[in-house]
Amino acid sequence: MIDYYQMFLITMAGIALFFLYTTCWKTNEKKQMEVFNCSILFYLLNYLFLKFL
């Protein structure tokens, strides 16, 4: 069961990553891969935080 704080964290992560993608997509390929890797790590940490909370 997903609680309200879990929905809040996932929604805020999605909004933050959306704005990060829109500002970074105009840059070079290396920067795009850094943003992609950071987003994967961000969601992984969010998942682990919610799993063990």
Image: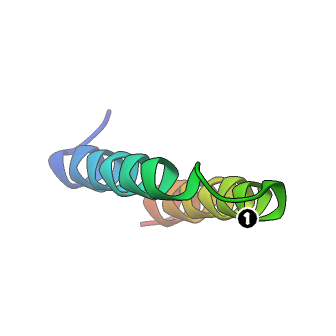
**Residue 20 percent location from the top left of the image:** 46, 58
Q: Left or right of 5: which side holds 50?
A: right
The amino acid beneath tag 1 is Lys
Quadrant for residue 47, please give it.
Answer: bottom right
Left or right of 42? Residue 41 is right
**Residue pointed to by mark 1:** 31
Residue farthest to the right, as pictured: 30
Nearer to us in this view, 37 or 19: 19
The one nearer the camera, 34 or 44, is 34
In terms of secondary structure, where does tag 1 sit?
helix
Q: Quadrant of the N terminus?
A: top left
The residue at the point 65 percent across, 60 percent down is 35
Q: Quadrant of the C terminus?
A: bottom left
Residue found 50% across the figure and 50% down from its top: 21
Please name the residue shown 58% across and 49% down the image.
Answer: 25
Toward the top, the furthest residue is 1
